[in-house]
Image (cartoon, rainbow, N blue to C red):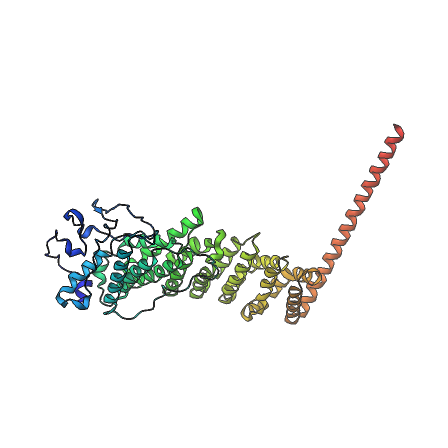
Amino acid sequence: MLKKIMKGRKPSKSDPNDSSLYGFNQPGGRNPGLNVVVNHASRVGPGQQTTSPGGAGMLSTPPPMGNIEALPLFRDVPVSDRQNLFLKKLQVCCFILDFSDTLKSVLEKEIKRQTLLELVDFIQSGSASHENTGQEAADPEDEDPYLEPSWPHLQLVYELLLRYVVSSDTDTKIAKRYIDHSFVLKLLDLFDSEDPREREYLKTILHRIYGKFMVHRPFIRKAINNIFYRFIYETERHSGMGELLEILGSIINGFALPMKEEHKLFLVRALIPLHKPKPVALYHQQLSYCITQFVEKDYKLADTVIRGLLKYWPVTNCQKEVLFLGELEEVLEATQAAEFQRCMVPLFRQIARCLNSAHFQVAERALFLWNNEHIVNLIAQNRNVILPMVFEALEKNTQSHWNQAVHGLTVNVRKMFLEMDTELFEECQNHHKEKQSRSKEMEEQRELTWKRLADVAAERGGDDMVTA
């Protein structure tokens, strides 16, 4: 029976004017029928009217107090009547109630909540089990997240949709008529919700739609791409970036090889520029995972990714710089020797600057790169280029960095280079001493020149006074 409901049905022969069909009594005998729609409770306020694509008016206001009637339970009616009862319960759930006032329409809210619970259980009864990530705790770093007042009902609506999507009884050929491009776009719009519980449900639902409706996959990727563009180049404000990137992380993991050009363009035009916006720290963990997945899938992309990171490297934001260094280590972990050689010169120029950062966390995180065996092997293979680039920064740290931990890590890195190639290390050391000596001579010469100028000025000043 459930399959009949979920896979389509013939139009009901019931009297369209029979208000009891929908579980409530409409004043004046007017029946909204199938024009009633569910709107997002946090987007459409009480009393607002919406219109359908065809122009028909859709009811979005609750009926007067007491007009929503509690319907019988599914188990209390014959099996032959359950399909019509299912439709009646759906219609009851289509009313939008005012959750900004907790004392308003209390009875209607409870009837609707119980009805939603029944619908969820009804669909679940014929479905395979699935993980539900919709009730995970909010991000602990978010001290005071916004919580949607209508969540007790809205959660059940999302649960109903999720169980319908994952149900083995759902016929995708029929369902795709309704879960179409327009539906997907509206679902994506909801990701900007400030309620973390809502975003978690949306993430799970969209991921399952992507998995089940293969025909929609290119469109979903393109739509997410457009959200990223708008965020990067226009608003820099969106609450759901982390959740969208989590979905993409899973999608990227499933890319077939050789990777399509479309996917590589997505990396270059959308993912790498996502390092630019100021709030990158809010979604950096998920972004870093997506970037690393690309390099692990196709190691030849490492040069592109590293140069992209360098392009957007923060100048004044030290906490952001620490995040970049952590991501850089993950990317280098998947980088092969040939790709490393292409980008190592600009890369280690930047690392040398980080080594001398007055912010101890930046300097410390840069020095931690030498704790990674794979990265040390890459450095060792190219030490003739890399050591001369970072030697001066290492020497400066050992002589004058204020942080003791940075000083100790620097000593360890110097020792590592010395053991790698004593001759090269001594050559760099001699070159550094010569440079310091030349610099000292130039400084002394500069001071001597200034002294001579000061003496000449003093003499001329004295002569002027005598003449006067």
Residue 386: give x, y in percent of width and height.
61, 62
Residue 325: give x, y in percent of width and height.
54, 61
263 lies left or right of 38 = right
Residue at the spot x=16%, y=50% of the render?
31
Give above or below for 170 relative to 150.
below
Residue at the spot x=39%, y=62% of the render?
252
Q: Residue furthest top?
A: 468
Residue 207: give x, y in percent of width and height.
34, 62
Quadrant showing the N terminus:
bottom left
Q: Nearer the viewer, residue 355 or 69?
A: 69
Q: Nearer the viewer, residue 382 or 311?
A: 311
Q: Nearer the viewer, residue 131 or 324?
A: 131
Task: Give the quarter of the image for residue 69.
Answer: bottom left
Residue at the spot x=25%, y=53% of the render?
95
- State the count of labels: 0
Residue 154: give x, y in percent of width and height.
31, 58
28 lies left or right of 279 = left
192 lies left or right of 108 = right
Question: Is residue 213 in view from this perspective?
Answer: no
